[in-house]
Amino acid sequence: MRYSKIISWPLFSLLIFCLLASISWAVVLNDSNLGAFFSGSTVTEVVDNFRQIYYSYISSQSTPAFLSYESWYNALFLSFRTLLVSILAIGLAGLVALITFASGARNLAMEGKSPLKKPFASLVFYLLRVLYTVTRSVPELIWAMLIVFTMQAGIVAGALALAIHNFGILGRLCSEVVENMDQRSIRSLRSSGASSGQIILYGVFPEVLPQLLTYILYRWEVVIRTTVVVGFIAAEGLGRQFRLSMSWFHYDEVIVLLTCYVALVLIVDAVSGCLRKMAS
Amino acid sequence: MTLAYRVNDVSFEAEGNKIIQHVSLSVKTGERVAILGASGAGKTTLLRLLAAQIKPNTGEISLYGENTSDLDSGEKLSRYVGVINQQYDLIQELSVRNNVMAGNLGRWGMWRSMLSLLSTIDSDIGTRALERVGLSDKTHQRLSRLSGGEQQRVAVARLIVQDPLLIIADEPVASLDPTRAFEVMSLLHNITSPTDKTLISALHSYDLTTHFFERVIGLRRGEVSFDMPVKELSKDDLEKLYSVDQDD
Amino acid sequence: MVVSGRSRVAIILATAFLASVYIADWNRAIPRSSGFSGINEILRGFLQPDFSQDFLIVAIKATWTTITFGTSAIFLALVIAIPLSFVASGTLFRSAVARMASITLVRFLLALIRSIHELIWAWLLAVLFGFSPITGVLALAIPYSAILARVFSDFLNDVPNAPLRALRSSGASNVQTLLYGRIPMVYKDMLSYGFYRFECCLRSAAVLSFIGLQGIGYQIEVSMQDLYFGQVWVLIYFLIFLIVSVDWWGSKLRRSLAN
């Protein structure tokens, strides 16, 4: 029986999704103390919170952090370190993805176009696919936790956690580009006498590299946001200081850090957009 | 005169369809053969069989004495056969120069191939090939910037660099306007005729056929309908070739 | 020799990367003193995952919690983002001035909102509203709605003009052009991207549970603190399964839309 004739897959998905969403909302609302949330008490609580924060923590300081030159300078230094981690991370991810994607593409590995010998090529293909899937499904923070368990916290630890996750994303994307490529140009190169390796060099790379470049720039925007958060755990840059300041209730410092964070993200967005335009 | 091709009772079928049925013919070195036929008659398949890109189900094709079913390596084959198609032969993202130099890939090893991509030192063969097709001024441009006619000329330049013994062309000018089509066919003629290279081309233009070729083979429903010198070709033969009748 | 814009960008990126490699403090990249035993523990856990019934129940519950968080959040985000994207794309306004104003103002606001990572939103909201599931859901929904609104508004704007002109010449108002013209052209892309963000949202929900709300991340932290890496790996497997399933669902959806 053709179920697809009764109800189309997109509609079916939509229904399932709405069902899931309703159940989820029911659970969430059930578990939260909504009565207090929506009554006036919470709003006054929040205002009180604000007032308390302001009076006890901010105005009591002789020089609140956002007025002190030193704390801004410090925050800028930390922002620079955070930027460093993000560049290192995305660079590593891109590099390793570049090296591996050709073996991770189904049409190359399975149809004998890989430079590797036949049984190896399929094995490497499956291995790479699994690797891409695992690394991109597990969020960066969890990788960070595992890494910090084994390695000293710092720039490299944070960059590694981000790189691992983004490697999976970039690797899979490149493999997909290769799989969706027009096969005719590749076939034509073969008639000029090219070996598999030469085909990859002359036919695949020129097609994939520009896409990889654009996507690296897109991912960089995402990575810079996550770098700060990874810094909580990998004890580096703005993230680490954020955690410290929060735990000491130095909300004035938090304001400084937040401003630098937002500025950093906006700058990276602008630079990335600019570079992407240059590359097109 | 040596025999370039001897095709012996070759059949090919795919997905249950008999595309080529019991075709036998031979081609001598230096012949210029046009293949005509309606779409679906099997021209592309026949050319691919000749280019050893696919293997016949029955019968055999021998290319300068070697069975095409045994010719697997790209290198060796590329010295015998060069192919040019209607489109999509070239790498859009590479420069004109790199596309042309790719004709050397059968001779080069990996390192040389890589070096050629990075360095911009013009090699003689490539420069001369581009001069012959009249595109020297576009040497360093990305291929995607060129028009369809110019891209076909780059494909011809690549063939010049590859320098195979024979050229197989599958509707090389079908998407070009008449002037450009004439230019490209002249180029193909000029690189094969003086050097006694064989040229086998599928076409759908009667004018180009009579102008550039000496022998014409008509293909109809996978079988050879006629095989005669171009001078003897009449419009009647063509009508019968392209007609759509219900029987047989 | 003319260097193409693309090569220039590649060179810039390569230089930046090499600089970062140089500046990074690699001497801290060594395993800690307890590091080797740490690697040992992780490997041991990998080879002996904890599939005991008790723990499986814990894992399933945690996964379900993460699912509820993520789904609620993305649903809310979509509900907010779709109308927001109409405003952000400026397609509702006729006069150029109003359009410019709505575009720049709203987009700037969106950029600010989405520049803050959901964990930081969570922390901020928790400070103000305390810990509760609804705070977590809001912490996810706010940045995600900004991201979705921005991308959807780009989709709406990048639509070819010719069909819209035809609609307007047959008398359609702005809203009608939107409904009959733009949306039918972009709804597939919107669905596709929305699903991709659904997957991301689930991942974020798993991570969000670090700050004390229930979920996979919380359980991972708990198990890690007790060094039960067998449990950690099982939770990771559940997370991978969840993400892969949603990804598969999304691909199927995309393929059926393409036909």
Image: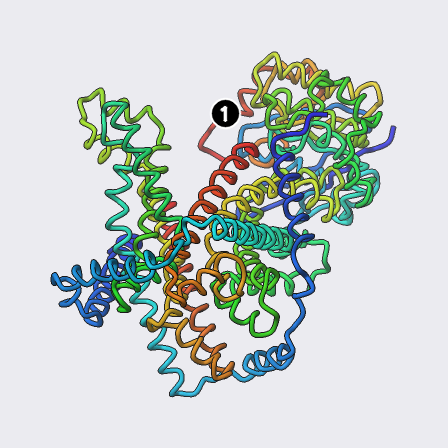
**The quarter of the displayed image where residue C110 is located:** top left
Give the residue at mark 1. Answer: B243
One can see residue B56 in this view? yes
**Neighbour tally class for label 1: few under 14, some 14-19, many 20 plus, Cα within 10 Å:** few
Residue with the most extreme front position:
A62
Residue C179: percent from left, percent from top: 22, 36
The residue that appears at 23% across and 43% down in the rendered structure is C83
Q: Quick check: A116 above or below A142?
A: above
Residue B71: percent from left, percent from top: 77, 46
For mark 1, give the secondary structure. Answer: loop
The image quadrant where one finds the C terminus of chain C is top left
One can see residue A3 in this view? no
Which of the two residues, B213 or C12, is positioned nearer the viewer here? C12
C59 left or right, relative to A107: left
Which of the two residues, B181 or B114, is positioned nearer the viewer here? B114
Residue B152: percent from left, percent from top: 65, 24
The image quadrant where one finds the N terminus of chain C is top right
Which of the two residues, B101 or C14, is positioned nearer the viewer here? C14
The residue that appears at 40% across and 57% down in the rendered structure is A254
**The quarter of the displayed image where residue C61 is located:** bottom left
Q: Quick check: C122 above or below A176?
A: below
Give the amino acid type for the residue marked by disc 1 in the picture. Ser
